[in-house]
Amino acid sequence: MPARFTTVDEFLTAQSLERRADVESLRKLVREAEPRLDEVVKWNSPSYTLDGMDRLTINAAGRGPVQLILHFGTNQPEDKGAVPTFSNDPDGLLIWHSNIRASLRLPKADQLAAERDAITAVIRAWLAQ
């Protein structure tokens, strides 16, 4: 079982150099999208709250790409069979897991600059819901 992290710094220290760089890139995008977010450790990962509500979590577990999970915490019931109501993803960046939870994969470094504006726009639109 992975270590239980109490701070984002502890989380980052436990990551490989490549993983840490990816997490830092995603943290920067999140902060660009909404500077008012509070960064905490929840679900053993860097997570972000807005006005006290859980909204985003970085998933760096496993060997796949680092992802940003867009969610509504545990405040709303989740229906994995329901159609999502969010429609502000014109570039199709999100992978849907339920009506209230999606993931956004961090693009490879050579594609990040081209997708930066689209990613921050999706994050802003998600947080506005």
Image (cartoon, grey):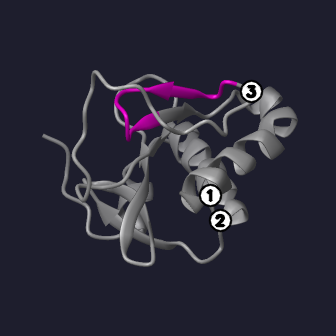
Amino acid under disc 3: Asp
Residue 46 placement: quadrant = bottom left
Question: Residue sitting at 21 percent across and 46 percent down?
Answer: 77
Verify CB contact (< 8 Å) between mark 2 and mark 1: yes
Amino acid under disc 1: Val
SS at badge 3: loop
Q: Which residue is mark 3?
A: 91
Q: Which residue is mark 2?
A: 31
Span of residues in magenta = 92-102
- Characterize the local packing of mark 3: few (<14), some (14-19) or many (20 or more) Cα atoms within 10 angstroms: few
Q: Which residue is mark 1?
A: 30
Taking depth in this image into account, of 125 and 58 the one nearest to the observer is 125
Residue that extends furthest to the right in the rendered view of this protein: 114
Question: Residue sitting at 54 percent across and 72 percent down?
Answer: 37
Q: Is residue 104 above or below residue 31?
A: above
Query: Which percent across, then down, holds residue 21?
Result: 61, 46
| CA gap, disc 2 and disc 1 | 4 Å
| CA gap, disc 3 and disc 2 | 21 Å
**Label placed on residue 105:** none
Q: Judge depth for marks 3 and 2 and give the one in front.
A: 3
Residue 20 relative to residue 51: left or right: right
- Characterize the local packing of mark 1: few (<14), some (14-19) or many (20 or more) Cα atoms within 10 angstroms: many
Query: Which percent across, then down, holds residue 128?
Result: 59, 61
Verify CB contact (< 8 Å) between mark 3 and mark 1: no
SS at badge 1: helix
User: Is residue 99 highlighted in magenta?
Assistant: yes
- Characterize the local packing of mark 2: few (<14), some (14-19) or many (20 or more) Cα atoms within 10 angstroms: some
Query: Which percent across, then down, holds residue 42?
Result: 28, 61
SS at badge 2: helix
